[in-house]
Image: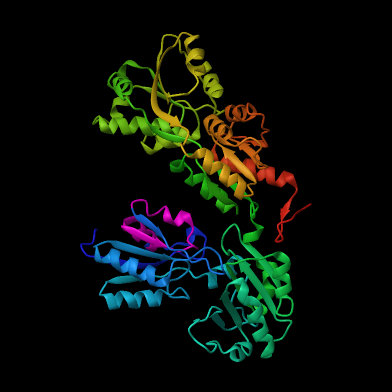
Amino acid sequence: MHRRNGFVSLVGAGPGDPTLLTLRGKKVLETCDVVIYDHLVDPVVLNHARRASKIYVGKHGEGREKSTSQESIESTMIELARRGKHVVRLKGGDPFVFGRGGEEALHLVQAGIPYEVIPGITSGIAAPAYAGIPLTYRGLSADVTFITAHEDPAKKRPQIDWRAVASLKGTVVIFMGMIMLPKTVKHLLKYGKRGDTPVTVIRWGTTARQKVVEGTLATIVREIEKAKLTSPVLAVIGKVNRLRKFLKWFEAKPLFGKTVLITRPKTQASELHEALTLEGARVIELPTIEISPVRDFHKLDQAIFRINRFDWLVFTSPNGVEMFFNRLRHLKKDSRILNGLKIAAIGPSTEEKLNLYAIAPDLVPTTFTTAGLLDAFRSVRVQGKRFLLLRADIAPRAFTHALSSRGAVVSEVAAYRTRKPADLGGRLNELVKDEVIDYVTFTSASTAAHFFESIRNGSRLAAKLISIGPATSSAIRAFGRPVEREARVSTLQGLVDAILEAQWNSGTTYVQDDKRLK
């Protein structure tokens, strides 16, 4: 429901893992007009706000690039609301836990702007949980204290009673930048906290970039210097840290610490993204192919109008299925026109897409390739039969030639177009320069061709290349690149399994200092 008057939602984006966003937070992102978001908000969270304008107001701190002032953020938020916009102020963690959400809410009240608060999971709870540290545990800690080491710079005296903090018996969680840690440790030791008190410092908690450094109050500063840890970090002080060696579940995931690049079209990447994330990988999406409707629907429309003249309708990708049924809707028709027609799907992904339209294909090969589909048709009488093949505009014609040679009458119709994204080269080479990528996945020959056509000569790409099937592998090798693994089954899960096989067979284990040891 659209609001007539301006309104602000103060939304907690959660601790880093985008899947920890609340359902209510997702709902307002999907319906808002503008999102004003912080530095620590994962870009995946912003994908929920597809229709909204986005304004970045990140605060980096610690002497890095210039940050947006708090006053500017508040004035922008109020100005947009006064224009009648539904504004989401999206903040990392929880808006009311060390996030200045209270200040922003008060300014909204003073400006007469209606607002709501949608809590988020704070990193103070989530990051220790992902590091395997329960904040309370019978016999070890019965209380938790949350502290920010970033005090109000306008105050002349410290606001934190470090003597009182040092006397606490339970768990202390400190939100801080790295530059504050030595001073914090000094205060606690000065006021009597034991030097052998366990300390864990967590960077980028709950994300695949999570890095954990362990020590004691006496050693932690030296340990983080050795690990070259940088912000954002959170420190956990107390006996509960001793449980981490038994409970560090997140880092035990098989792809933890690995970065995987997905080259699928953005609209089709989510399933693969989620599957890899569940295995612990950090996933970067860089589509090397765009799927769009054909410019002229005349041939497709004519095929639909004459669909009863065909014996077989053949789909070679989920894209063809989607475009075909979109066109049926446009022409005010439905699946009843397929009555009496046999349908073939090249593989399970295409079959699943057909199932969404309540269509069960008559033929699906056991090998999910063009060659596999042709083999499947060897058990079918094709001579004199009329086939309608829905394909991409640039798809090879091997299937048509092979069936025609057996006496079939094949009509090819381009149901969709595939293109290389216009800005691919710049984005790809910037990414390869800035990131250490462990694996690159390819789901079609086109994704591979566009990738290697765009990558700069001499580029230092050391990633292992994972292919979904034989045709894709051939395209990769055509550019002189080795294929590390080809999926045993040409599905997205097969692709994930291929990465897991490559990881297991490499005999390497990710450890916290970024070294890979046998």
Whether residue 360 is visible = no
Residue 56, how many percent across, how many down? Answer: 42, 60
Residue at image x 49%, y 18%?
A: 397
- Residue 26 forms part of the magenta stretch: yes
Task: Give the colour scheme shown.
Answer: rainbow
Establish if 168 lies above or below 340.
Answer: below
Above or below — where is 132 with respect to 354?
Answer: below
Question: Per the image, is 71 magenta?
Answer: no
Q: Position of residue 452 (x, y in %)?
A: 59, 33
Magenta range: 25-51
What residue is drawn where x is 46% and y is 75%?
97
Tally of numbered tags = 0
Q: Is 171 situated left or right of 291 in this image? A: right
Image position of 365 (left or right of 189)? left
Tell me the quadrant of the picture where the N terminus can be found. bottom left
- The residue at 42%/33% (across/down) is 319
Task: Report x, y in % for residue 240.
Answer: 65, 77
What is the quadrant of residue 341 in the picture?
Answer: top left
Give how far across and how far down residue 324 sits, in percent. Answer: 35, 29
Whether residue 430 can be seen here: yes
Q: Find residue 298 and report its image quarter.
A: top left
The residue sitting at the right extreme is 518
Residue at x 30% of width, y 69% of height? 78
**In the figure, is residue 270 to the left or right of 3?**
right
Residue 265 or residue 132, whichever sits in front: 265
